[in-house]
């Protein structure tokens, strides 16, 4: 009896303390909502042009200039070619031109669409997201698209140093400055998924790197404004320095964020723009209708030197293989038969 009274007294003392804890806490026993138990599965793509489908054409009208939306999402984008058992929904939230600020939470920059992480949160509550695929970073400090444009302009000034010689001293620093921004974006994706009721093991998060769109194997009669107007030394620099260093930065970001990494740096080897074989990248591409429209003029060249539909299909095949494994990292490399394998 005495033991019972002692235990009863302890309970009486603990009850008010527990009540005070509940009042002071932010309801710690509430479980995040999560998707409905019957929700269908989905894979979601986030990032920039290499994920949105830039270069593949047939862009959805709402992302092809309507209300100044130039995200250029294509139904031939990589995400739309992914093969995954029992995943009926492939959702593309990527936007051409996006930097990490379009993923990172609590940023002050505004765009024509809500931040991709905000959109991801809504998708994660409606569907059971099994994978989030990300390609981001090239539009931050590296400004890879601007670099390619600089290399195009260099051919018009043969007596000046090429773009590679001009950029090379700053290139490692630009890549290094990008890395923490990509890491933060990946952490914020994790946060949004956690807030939506997902544990880290409930889905896979993959960061992919960028494939080299051009290489020195360009057909010489296409090394001009009709195809690939690059100086030979710049083509070597893009393949041998720019893309490998950018790839190393992406790998470092994936490792720091603790996410999976798919290396695409050599995925386009032998299929670059103007290589003359089965090309997986667009050449210098001018949309002449946009070129003659003052409201669309600045986007007339937007699809140049991006993967085309064939390229996205090949990359999707490799990504599908990667998703089917439990490998932390892998590389897409030529398989010798015109396709890609995991290396």
Image (cartoon, rainbow, N blue to C red):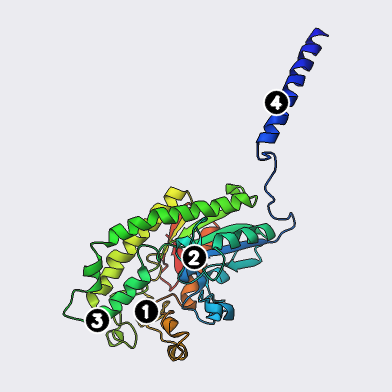
Residue visible at 24% across and 70% down in the picture: 164
As measured in the structure, the alpha-carbon distance from the residue carrying label 2 to the one carrying label 4 is 56 Å
Chain-order first, disc 1 or disc 3 = 3
As measured in the structure, the alpha-carbon distance from the residue carrying label 1 to the one carrying label 3 is 17 Å
Quarter of the image where the C terminus is located = bottom left
The residue that disc 3 covers is 155
Mark 4 neighbour density, 10 Å: few (under 14) some (14–19) many (20 or more): few
Disc number at residue 273?
1
As measured in the structure, the alpha-carbon distance from the residue carrying label 4 to the one carrying label 1 is 69 Å
The residue that disc 4 covers is 17
Frontmost of labels 1 and 3 is 3
Chain-order first, disc 3 or disc 2 = 3
In the picture, measured across the screen, residue 127 lies left or right of residue 174, that is right
Dot 2 falls on a residue whose secondary structure is helix
> Is residue 212 placed above or below 152 in the rendered structure?
above
Dot 3 falls on a residue whose secondary structure is loop
């Amino acid at each position: 009896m005495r033991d019972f009274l002692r235990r009863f007294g302890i309970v009486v003392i603990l009850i008010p303390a527990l009540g005070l804890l509940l009042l002071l806490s932010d309801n710690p026993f509430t479980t995040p909502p999560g998707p409905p138990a019957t929700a269908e599965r989905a894979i979601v793509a986030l990032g920039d042009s290499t994920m949105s489908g830039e270069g593949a054409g047939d862009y959805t009208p709402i992302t092809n200039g309507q209300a100044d939306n130039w995200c250029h999402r294509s139904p031939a984008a990589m995400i739309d070619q992914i093969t995954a058992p029992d995943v009926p929904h492939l959702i593309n939230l990527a936007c051409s031109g996006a930097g990490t600020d379009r993923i990172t939470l609590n940023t002050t920059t505004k765009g024509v669409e809500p931040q991709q992480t905000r959109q991801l949160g809504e998708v994660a509550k409606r569907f059971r997201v099994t994978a989030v695929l990300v390609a981001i970073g090239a539009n931050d400090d590296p400004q890879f698209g601007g670099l390619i444009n600089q290399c195009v302009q260099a051919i018009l000034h043969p007596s000046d140093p090429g773009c590679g010689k001009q950029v090379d001293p700053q290139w490692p620093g630009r890549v290094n400055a990008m890395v923490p921004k990509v890491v933060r974006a990946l952490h914020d994706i994790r946060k949004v998924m956690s807030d939506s009721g997902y544990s880290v093991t409930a889905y896979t998060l993959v960061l992919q790197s960028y494939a080299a769109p051009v290489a020195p194997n360009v057909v010489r009669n296409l090394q001009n404004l009709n195809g690939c107007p690059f100086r030979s030394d710049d083509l070597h620099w893009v393949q041998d320095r720019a893309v490998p260093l950018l790839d190393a930065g992406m790998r470092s970001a994936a490792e720091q964020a603790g996410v999976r990494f798919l290396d695409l740096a050599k995925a386009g080897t032998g299929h670059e723009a103007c290589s003359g074989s089965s090309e997986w990248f667009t050449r210098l591409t001018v949309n002449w209708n946009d070129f003659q429209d003052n409201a669309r003029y600045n986007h007339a060249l937007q699809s140049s030197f991006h993967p085309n539909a064939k390229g996205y299909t090949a990359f999707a095949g490799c990504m599908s293989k990667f998703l089917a494994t439990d490998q932390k990292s892998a590389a897409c490399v030529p398989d010798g038969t015109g396709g890609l394998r995991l290396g």
